Image (cartoon, coloured by chain):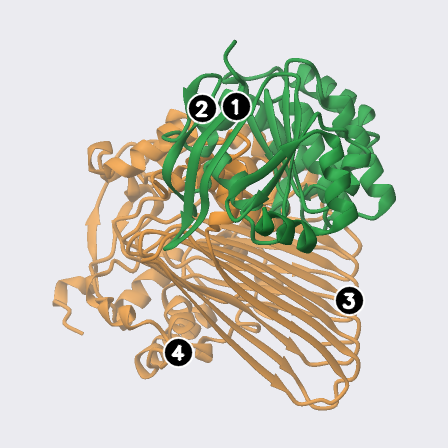
Amino acid sequence: MTTAPEAIVGEYKWGFYDPEEALFKANKGLNREIVNVISDMKGEPQWMREFRLRALEIFWQKQDPPWGSSQLKEIDFDDIHYYVKATDRDERSWDDVPEYIRRTFDRLGIPEAERKYLAGVGAQYDSEVVYHNIREDLEKQGVIFLGTDQALKEHEDIFKEYFGTVVPPADNRYAALNSAVWSGGSFIYVPKGVKVEIPLQAYFRINTQNMGQFERTLIIADEGSQVHYVEGCTAPIYRSDSLHSAVVEIIVKRGARVRYTTIQNWSNNVYNLVTKRAVAYQDAVMEWVDGNLGSKLTMKYPSVYLMEPGAHGEILSLAFAGKGQHQDAGGKIIHAASNTTSTIISKSLSKDGGRTSYRGLLKVYEGCENVKSTVRCDALLLDEESRSDTYPTMEIDAPNVHIQHEAYVSKLGEDQLFYLMSRGLSEEAAAKMIVNGFVEPIVKELPMEYAVELNRLIELQMEGAVG
Amino acid sequence: MTALLEIRDLRAAIGEKEILKGLNLTINAGEVHAIMGPNGSGKSTLANVLMGNPAYQVTGGDILFKGESVLDLSPDERARRGLFLAFQYPVPIPGVTLVNFLRQAVNAVRGEEVPIREFREKLFSKMELLKVDPDFARRYVNDGFSGGEKKRAEMLQMAVLEPAMAILDETDSGLDIDALRTVAEAVNKLMNPSMGLLLITHYQRLLNYIRPQFVHVLVDGRIARSGGPELAEYLEARGYDEFLAELARA
């Protein structure tokens, strides 16, 4: 670590349009002082400061996983701002946004105001009116839906009880990093028996800092409750900072049901290294729907720990790797109790030399009876240069389990193309149709507006894939 | 009058292997032709070459459709001009519903966006005509279909796309007698005086239900004999082996 002494206090830039909104950007590089500054700026309780500092020590000790992509070595941890206050994001000008991102906004028909927000420049998209109504409804039901920083201030007791219990800082190097410098993210608490009817979207509180680099999300679904959380969006998110490392922790209590849907489309300079994990108790259902389109390298394996009988875990993963991209995605299911069931469905597309990997773990602990699991991985290669690999790991330490595992890698089929073309579809339209069909099992699980946008986005990425 | 489809001295190969060795055939509007032949005689190659399957290479001759050569046209361009091939092995397209597929196909063939209401009315009337269950349209194209369902789906596509010239490649294969009858009835309902029909089949049984005016026997990549419906019965009575021996003697 090479840090100049002045970095200790950081680089302050004061803005005067709102005296309380200090613009602040910590200097590049990572050290105890930066972590202290973050904690100070947020006015956090002492336990959180200690948690961060402890995590920082762990980060320094930890290595990258030996199976991880060699691209991880390219990350320069000294060249990253670890804390940028939301209001400071406005500094970049629209002209700095890469041409391909602007073109994609055009093609997706993203409104002007939203584009600037998504690109990280200019005014933020104002969805406050919509959000207020939703928030009132939720408050009546006792649902807490806040930015994670705000939740720590307003609901410290419940926060402290669960924070860091599902993904401890020592879990892996990037979980440690996130634990040290986390900022932003969503906090959701759903009381017993409350079923939240509409999907909760980070969008609704887009004016708080919800798309940070190191966001931290914590969801607690109390007994018999139900909630669907949606994060991300299909439009590309442009960040000049090249590392995104989030942690998501979810606790699904007895009889509760949580679905967590992610669509990520980071710009192609971003390393997206995210730890997502849920614990599911008796008769609880946890579902991850995870779509990865953007980034340079994504390493993400949403996990479900099935802790008590009757728990069910489901992971639907979709990855699209274009030129220069590596999507290393998959899922982990841990059966730690009898009568638990799980499903993993992974669909990946590679084109223009892009690379997708399915990396999965299925573990059944000793003494677990009557466990059922289905794993299915389909990879579709759109051209000769592209690549797909499967790394399934199974650790089955119980005799009475029913496991089904299927993996298919296929190329965009000449037979399918000819069949569709014989019905009048152009080669490009035929290829799009095959790809849309391929991803349909995942897309149909998405909220309507996301499904439509995702299909459009895939079509956009498909253009020029054939012929 | 220009013939609807005119095949002139057609030669075609897969890789190095020549399969069609100078095939001639003319089909006019309103005519039903059947091509019969033993396995390996080139029946399916003919079907694929007519539709422009890039896996086959045309090495000689010409295919004229409505008086113009289609050899340089891609399969989709041929479809837009009014050619249709009912596949022997229809290809599954998982995740794509039949209704969605048909809508795009109709739009592509017509070259314009058909209003959704008009399309639906057409689709449902054709489904009724072919006695196809309405739920069928919401299933994924050929995905998990039985043999009979696949062939019925092909007929539904033909009904909706309304081609000028339809080629039915072994449409009877893999069907039990009831399914065969249903599919044949569908073809008979769809045939009209401005349309040409080419049935490609190994067995005579399909021809009990769809009566061709012209029957041709394909042997080793060429039409070895042509005649009326009686030729099919003659062939069925003797079998291909005896027929081939007879040809050899002649």
Q: Mark 3 belongs to which amino acid?
A: Arg
Q: Position of residue B127 (x, y in %)?
A: 78, 27
Which residue is identified by label 4?
A54
Q: Mark 2 belongs to which amino acid?
A: Leu
Which mark identifies residue B64?
Answer: 2
Q: Residue at x 81, y 33 (%)?
A: B209
Mark 4 and mark 2, same subunit? no
Crowd band around label 2 with a 10 angstrom C-alpha radius: few (<14), some (14–19), many (20+): some
Question: Mark 2 touching mark 1, by CB under 8 A?
Answer: yes
Which residue is identified by label 3?
A254
Q: Using the image, name the chain to which the residue with label 2 belongs.
A: B
Q: Mark 4 belongs to which amino acid?
A: Arg
Q: Is residue A410 left or right of residue A265?
A: right
The chain letter of the orange chain reads A
The chain letter of the green chain reads B
Mark 4 and mark 1, same subunit? no
Which residue is identified by label 1?
B5
Mark 2 and mark 1, same subunit? yes
Q: Residue at x 65, y 54 (%)?
A: A259
